[in-house]
Image (cartoon, grey):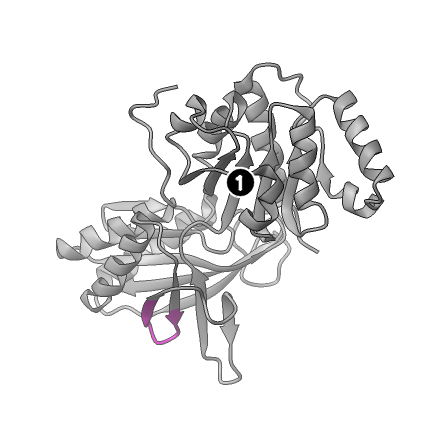
Amino acid sequence: MDFFNASPSVPRDLLVWQHAIACLRAGIPVSLLLVVSSSGSSPGRQGFKMSVAPGSMVGSIGGGIMEHKFVELARHGLAEGPREVLLREQIHRGEAPHNRSGMICSGQQTLLLLPLHDDHLPTLRFVADALQHNRRAWLRCTAAGELHAEAGPLPTPAGLHRSADDAWEYREILGFREQLTIVGGGHVGLALSQVVANLDFRLTVLDDRTGLNTLQLNPYAHEKRTVDYAALDQVIAEGLHQYVVIMIFGYRTDGVALRQLLGRQFAYLGVMGSAAKIATMRKELRAEGYSEEQLARVHAPIGLPIHSRTPEEIAISVAAELIRARNAPRG
């Protein structure tokens, strides 16, 4: 691991906004492509975006023939002069009667093509600065081509909102949507931090040991804290975008940490350990009165079964399970 050249990740969208800013500053026409809604097996998920200029582009809206088609559409508009805001549905089925994307992976997505102008520069700079410095902020796009961003939590629901007169607006929380908390800053926690640094999670690493070298050396975490595991319920927020992995050295401390979090709502809650250790832990928790429903929400032992042994192999198996949980359909 190259600790000296690594640093906490930034949201992948930052490069898109920086490219758009650079183009406008240089007098190069540029457009924003943005997935404003998605469903099913759509390759482009809500929030995916690209900046497209005549000779360059950054980002992705899902790839394949659909992305190529919209890149060409954007570039054609750039060459024609005055440009309009477009909102188009794309259906990924060959038998669809209209709005076929050219892909057959099922699902569908709605794409926004927003020509960018110098008037957008203050908003673009604000967005890029918020992403660069990990500040809470939100974005709003409208059918009239307005682009607006503000600091703080989004005051209204995110997503695409249509009105009766065919007007619409799109609202998005900027930055990392998912928060991963690793409880345990040892060797496996460090290895997992390195893997998830490329997966668009905001990463917090917690440990109860003061001066732990693997925690101090961890360059990938956005936040590192020494905490009392008996107080985790006061430290870790619950929610549909909160992921928690417990990988502590010690069976008893695993149990202390897990007891603080059972019964709370998370997108993912997992515990590292052997099958024998996890079976014993579950038995004790049942005896203490924890319900089968509560225990069923805990992923344990964590990680996909790939016979992993080293910290790096375990990290990959756990990261794969986190990806599966994040991308699973939500009921």
State left or right for residue 275 relative to residue 4.
right
Can see residue 151?
A: yes
What x and y, as percent, mark residue 284? Answer: 82, 33
Q: Is mark 1 on a helix, strand or loop?
A: strand
Reply above or below: 305 against 152.
above
Magenta stretch holds residue 272: no
In the image, 330 versus 39, the foreground residue is: 330
What x and y, as percent, mark residue 4? Answer: 29, 23
In the image, 242 versus 288, the foreground residue is: 288
In the image, 114 versus 83, the foreground residue is: 114
State left or right for residue 251 relative to residue 191.
right
Q: Name the residue under label 1.
A: 181
Q: Quadrant of residue 213?
A: top left
Reply above or below: 6 against 147.
above
Reply above or below: 192 against 58.
above
Name of the residue lying farthest toward the bottom: 165
> Could you tell me which residue is drawn at 70 percent across and 41 percent down?
259
> Could you tell me which residue is drawn at 53 percent across and 32 percent down?
208
> Could you tell me which residue is drawn at 71 percent across and 45 percent down?
262
Can see residue 302?
A: no
> Could you tell me which residue is drawn at 81 percent across and 47 percent down?
293
Name of the residue lying farthest toward the top: 309
Where the C terminus falls, by quadrant? bottom right
Q: In which quarter of the image is residue 116?
A: bottom left
What x and y, as percent, mark residue 222? Answer: 40, 40
- Start and end of the magenta stretch? 141-149
Where the N terminus falls, by quadrant? top left
Mark 1 burial class by Cα count in 10 Å: few <14, some 14-19, many 20+: many
What x and y, as percent, mark residue 122? Answer: 22, 64
State left or right for residue 235 relative to residue 169.
right
Q: Please, what is the three-letter code of the amino acid marked with disc 1?
A: Thr
Magenta stretch holds residue 148: yes
